[in-house]
């Protein structure tokens, strides 16, 4: 059985729960509270020297880090991983888009608003994070216009990866009203059988 | 024949040239100068709505974005893409590490030092970029100790992706002296047959 080391209110970690639930794979969830520094302790660094959640541990003790790499590992040869070569590359394109152009703005804004005290100095970063995050949302909105899902027009791990922080963007102060195609896609993802809601950040729950 | 839209002095773009040369695949290189805003023009945004280089165009006109997704697409079923499932996931882990924990610090410091005027206000970002970049280098140094390459101890696309900006880290003000395992690995990568040097940034050439 897989063990997931993760924080339930983290979108990067919730991606794994979503996928494992969709695939009906049993797993043990080991909660790691990164807000208290647990992911910087020696026992955690032995699992992932980069000090980040989530980490997937296999039965043989091997560990794998990076949420989107873990999604690919788990989804391979399932209905949530496309067959054709270009569709697989297109999935990876959106996974890298998520980690480079989306998560560093939309997830970080949520972290500042949902996990730090309301008078924290990092709130000064919010205007820039909102500007960059809206650029990512605009790219998604344009692409989703006339499409049901991100790759091959059927539900897959690109949708799971992008859903994780997009559906919670309001936690970081984003408004989704200007993005009707994104909102319709979020409803389609949340309507998939086996969908699991994500835990709320401590300051917003 | 593939067409690559890229800037020769960009590490993300140079990754593609390295891989295509290693595989002996013919390609047409279309230079895009992002410093003059060429990647934000309508003709380029039609290739990649996210406005970033590189972009790979196939013979049938289809385009693919995100440097590391393109590496995976091109390397599939070649000697530079591992066979076993966990080794493929490990490759992806390092590709996501590169784009999330490495490139945003080491490549951005190089951009500020190598492409912007010496009195540019963004130089104020350098201390933070150096701190975070050194964290990424420390993770690599620890992992490479006793290893020849990143995955299965043989040269592959994880090495190509991480080489691109690591070998040019000095351009952004990083010192590689404290990282002997990284320096030995850089020499091994540069010593591969078919290796192509990267163009220098305009302010450092």
Image (cartoon, coloured by chain):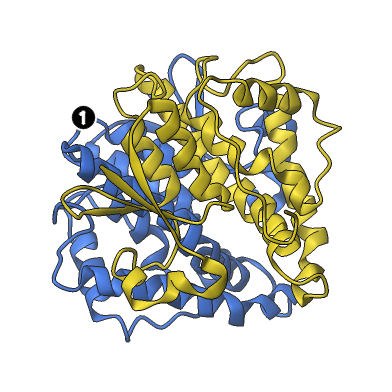
Chain colours: A blue, B yellow
- Picture layout, residue A67 above or below residue B119: above
> Residue drawn at (81%, 36%), measured in percent from left and top?
B176
Element at label 1: loop
- Tell me which chain the residue with mark 1 is part of: A
Nearest the viewer among A142 and A73 is A142
Residue bearing the label numbered 1: A77
Report crowding for label 1: few under 14, some 14 to 19, many 20 or more residues within 10 A (C-alpha): few
Dividing the picture into quadrants, the one containing residue B79 is top left
Residue B202: where, in percent of width, then height? 68, 60
Res A81 visible: no
Residue B116: where, in percent of width, then height? 71, 69
> Residue drawn at (57%, 48%), measured in percent from left and top?
B11
Residue B106: where, in percent of width, then height? 69, 50
> Residue drawn at (72%, 59%), measured in percent from left and top?
B114
> Residue drawn at (25%, 68%), measured in percent from left and top?
A143
**Residue A82 vs residue A160: left or right?**
left
Res A115 visible: yes
Nearest the viewer among A126 and B130 is B130
- Picture layout, residue B144 above or below residue B170: above
Nearest the viewer among A140 and A172 is A140
């Amino acid at each position: 059985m897989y063990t997931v080391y993760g924080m339930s209110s983290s979108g990067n970690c919730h991606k794994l729960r979503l996928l494992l639930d969709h695939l009906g794979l049993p797993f043990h969830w080991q909660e790691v509270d990164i807000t208290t520094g647990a992911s910087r302790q020696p026992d955690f660094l032995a699992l992932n020297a980069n000090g980040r959640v989530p980490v997937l541990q296999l039965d043989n003790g091997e560990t794998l880090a990076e949420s989107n790499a873990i999604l690919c590992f788990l989804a391979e040869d399932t209905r949530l991983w496309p067959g054709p070569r270009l569709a697989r590359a297109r999935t990876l394109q959106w996974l890298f888009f998520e980690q480079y152009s989306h998560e560093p703005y939309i997830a970080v804004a949520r972290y500042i608003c949902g996990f730090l005290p309301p008078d924290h100095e990092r709130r000064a970063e919010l205007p820039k994070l909102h500007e960059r995050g809206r650029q990512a949302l605009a790219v998604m909105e344009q692409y989703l216009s006339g499409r049901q899902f991100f790759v091959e027009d059927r539900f897959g791990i690109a949708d799971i990866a992008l859903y994780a922080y997009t559906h919670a963007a309001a936690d970081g102060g984003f408004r989704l009203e200007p993005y009707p195609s994104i909102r319709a896609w979020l409803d389609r993802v949340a309507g998939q059988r086996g969908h699991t809601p994500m835990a709320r950040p401590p300051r917003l729950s």
